[in-house]
Image (cartoon, helix red, strand yellow):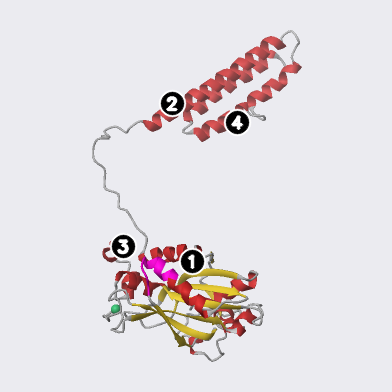
Amino acid sequence: MDIASIKEKISALVADVEEQLSRAANDNDLQQLKGSVLGKQGTLTGILRELPGLDPAERPQMGKTVNEIKEKITDLIEQKRTAIRLKATESPAGFDPTVPGFPVQRGGLHPVTQMCYDLNDAFRSMGFEIFEEDEITSELYGFDKLNFPPDHPARESMDTYWIAGHDSGSAADKLCLRPHLTGGSVRYMQTHKPPFRFVYPGPVYRNETTDARHERAFYQYEALIVDRDFTFTSGKVMIKSILSKVFGRDVPVRMRAGFFPFVEPGFEIDMGCLVCGGKGCSVCKHVGWIEVMPGGTPHPNVLRAAGLDPEEFTGFYVNIGLDRLVMMRYGVDDVRLFHSADLRFLSQFN
Ligand SMILES: [Zn+2]
């Protein structure tokens, strides 16, 4: 290695750096350039490594030159960096910053989402975990594990959306859009150790004719407590305090017997109509009460299907019709409005 060839390499390098700098458009380009020249495997670092091969008399002078070039390149890169930043803050020609801008359209949460969040807050304050589950489920989790008899009409395609190409075989192979949330509770129970309390909100799908109170896709909000001891009365008190928290006032609640395959005993929970205060109006069909949630004690077969011993554990299910609750909150009498994506309607709730 002789001094002439090193000098040649250095001047080629400087020319190359200047050329690359003229093309660099952002910090990233500069960072790359810096690495390729000054980094551990960089060109200039490579030249420095060749110095020990020089005549000892020439080494100090050449070492000094290489270091000066290193400083020069570092300076050039930093100058370019400053130039790029200054350019980024420049206004384009003809730009007048004093002209008023366009008003920004502000979005808002959908009233069903707002209700869901309010319920989450209320349940969380009572120690519930929030659990999310897939919207596609199987016949096994949608029906079998929930004590639905094999010939239950809800299994038919007139009630359930089966997934094409996955509608035969064993119950675990047959897939559908979840017709209710309850199947998710079994998955949770199978993977957690009781006692536990959790909620699992979300959309469910039924192949139904739509009317003012029914939609093909709608929102449910289900809660389950499993413990060694849990009474109906504590369930009723819990529901009452959740509803009172969400509506910000005392909400009357009543329970009636009801039948659902996954509970035993089962019940319907009604809340006093808040639109008319119980006197009777079109929203409550003039009875003063609105049916908002079925529920009950988990059926022993459901607990068994989830791997729990019904002799040891009991619990409390509630399945809140989220849309129904939102209708009650705002006195809206047609559920389809909430799914209409009509901004004239929805923007009222922002
Ligand atoms: Zn009413």
Mark 1–mark 2 Cα distance, whole angstroms, equals 56 Å
The picture quadrant for ligand 1 comes to bottom left
Q: Which circle marks residue 35 in the picture?
A: 4
Instruction: Characterize the local packing of mark 1: few (<14), some (14-19) or many (20 or more) Cα atoms within 10 angstroms.
Output: many
The amino acid sitting under disc 1 is Phe
Some atom of ligand 1 lies within 8 Å of the CB belonging to the residue at label 3: no
Q: Are marks 3 and 4 in contact (CB under 8 Å)?
A: no
* Depth order, front residue of 77/230: 230
The amino acid sitting under disc 2 is Ala
Mark 4–mark 1 Cα distance, whole angstroms, equals 55 Å
Q: Is residue 4 visible?
A: yes
- Rendered position, 159 above or below 52: below
Q: Nearer the viewer, mark 1 or mark 3?
A: 1
Q: Which circle marks residue 83 in the picture?
A: 2
The amino acid sitting under disc 3 is Phe
Q: Are marks 2 and 3 in contact (CB under 8 Å)?
A: no
Dominant secondary structure of the residues highlighted in magenta in the image: helix
| Residue at 23%, 38% in the rendered image | 99
Q: Which residues are magenta?
A: 241-251
Q: Identify the secondary structure beneath mark 1.
A: helix
| Residue at 48%, 69% in the rendered image | 201
The amino acid sitting under disc 4 is Gly
| Residue at 67%, 9% in the rendered image | 61
Considering only order in the chain, which callout, 3 or 1, is on the residue closer to the N terminus?
1
Q: Identify the secondary structure beneath mark 2.
A: helix
For the C terminus, give its image quadrant.
bottom left
Mark 1–mark 3 Cα distance, whole angstroms, equals 23 Å
Considering only order in the chain, which callout, 2 or 1, is on the residue closer to the N terminus?
2
Q: Which circle marks residue 123 in the picture?
A: 1
Residue 44, image quadrant? top right
Write down the residue under mark 3.
349
